Amino acid sequence: MPNTTLAAAPPGAVAGRPPAFDNSYALLPEALFARLPPTPVSAPRLLRLNDALAAELGLDPAWLASPAGVAMLAGNHVPDGAEPIAQAYSGHQFGHFSPSLGDGRAILLGEVVTPAGERRDIQLKGSGPTPFSRRGDGRAALGPVLREYIVAEAMAALGIPTTRALAAVATGDHVFREHALPGAVLTRIAASHIRVGTFQYFAARRDAASLRALLDHAIARHDPAAADAENPALAFFEGVVARQASLVARWMLVGFIHGVMNTDNCAVSGETIDYGPCAFLDHYHPETVFSSIDHQGRYAFANQPAIAHWNLARLAEALLPLIGEDEAAAVEKAKAVLARFSPAFGAAWRAGLLAKVGLHDERPGDEELIQDLLARMAEQEADFTLAFRRLADAAEGDGEGFAVLFADPAAGRDWLARWQARIAADGVAPGARAAAMRAVNPAYIPRNHLVEEALAAAVQRDDLAPFEALLEVLARPFEDQPRRERYAEPPRPEQRVRATFCGT
Ligand code: AMP
Ligand code: MG
């Protein structure tokens, strides 16, 4: 398993090669950020280094695990070439506009270009106060840091665009929330940290020059072809719309609920960002909400496409002056592009569901067949992940494991009979169908009770073994892993997590 713990290097020894920073955001107008270093912590201790990701990034794991590397990951040492900044952004939080959010507890150290030629941000989260901290302490507690580590890496293994976790470091300091908690710093890797809210920040201030510079930068990073389009701002918007439509469909196809889809937590790169009160469905129900602060169910499972659409409308508003000087005409152009969201989401969602139930072409009646399955799952509290996984077994003849997931197994058997009649018609060999289904229906997701168990062991007993074990299982979500059946099981009633907290 890729994991390195802090090895004692002899004093003065040079352990490996520090990152070769290549910063582009820090060259933009100064209004886009504040320059400041991270605030040092008392006693940095490397908890986990993602060696495989380091290699992908072209970073040297030996250096990262060395005292100098750990000092960088803790915010105690700013290596040559880093240009630490806190980025400015606004955001609609639960529908209300906050003009000044920004990195209140994060510092972008700089960027690297990977061996594959991709630009990536290296950001420390929990690295101390910044001019954007408002009343916050700029710090992060160990639990939420490990939670983001687990879920981000699980999403990556599931093939879903996401920011990544490079490292988690304990600070040796306490952070004070309801109780004193151990502090930690997460090193987050992202294609960029540009959010819908970043555009809103400059639009709200009518700072046309910064807005233009931000757009050009975002286009260069995420939509280089848009630079040559007739209307680059509109072409960029089109790219963001397409990426969000695909992303939200992919979330929902694995039962993911982001939990806090504010416009400041919506990345224009199309990566999932800001794992706060996120959670995965246990049993399927479209209205499921876990976040303890989402009282209205704004960010409920099935509301996510509507919210992404709403967020994209806010991006369109921010981009209007760049889309055209004639506002009415610009609005019409933006609306036409935004109108593509729902069909794009719908197509991705339907194609994904079709694959999940093992159908490779859509025939009349398939949509109803799938809707009937979802309705029965909701009514009968069937586990979302296991139902689809066990449907692959049913393709090879064993349907009872699927049926018993329904409170009344007859509801499962009934549906299975309809499905078997449908698949009998398309001539796909049972083994081939089952294999195709297992490649899209994970056996393992970061189940809420397993995540909580791993966090509790780390926070209460300084025991990282459950965290490590969970990461190892989640790295191969589509493979059945012998002796790890426990990780695939739904929670027992007393294990069920009903609410999640952002822990900020
Ligand atoms: P989030 O809930 O992580 O999306 O954060 C929303 C906003 O609150 C962002 O501007 C964060 O930088 C800020 N924030 C969250 N936690 C803290 C903290 N402990 N100290 C300072 N700012 C914070
Ligand atoms: Mg955020």
Image (cartoon, rainbow, N blue to C red):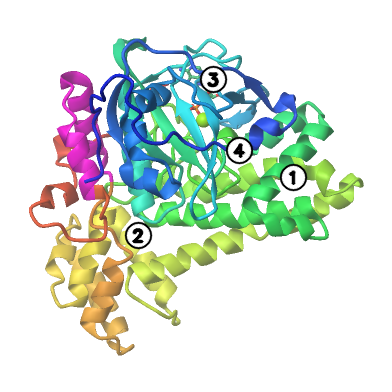
Q: Residue at x 61, y 48 (%)?
A: 309
**Segment colored magenta:** 446-473
Residue 85 coordinates in the image, percent (x, y): 59, 24
| Kind of residue at disc 2 | Ala
Sequence-first tag of 3 and 1:
3
| Kind of residue at disc 4 | Arg
**Residues tagged 4 and 2 counted as in contact (Cβ below 8 A):** no
Disc 2: which residue: 375
Does the numbered disc 3 mark a residue whose Cβ is under 8 Å from ligand 1?
A: yes
Residue 184 coordinates in the image, percent (x, y): 35, 21
Q: CA distance from mark 3 to mark 1?
A: 25 Å
| Kind of residue at disc 1 | Asp
Disc 3: which residue: 104
Does the numbered disc 2 mark a residue whose Cβ is under 8 Å from ligand 1?
A: no
Q: CA distance from mark 1 to mark 2?
A: 46 Å
Disc 1: which residue: 216
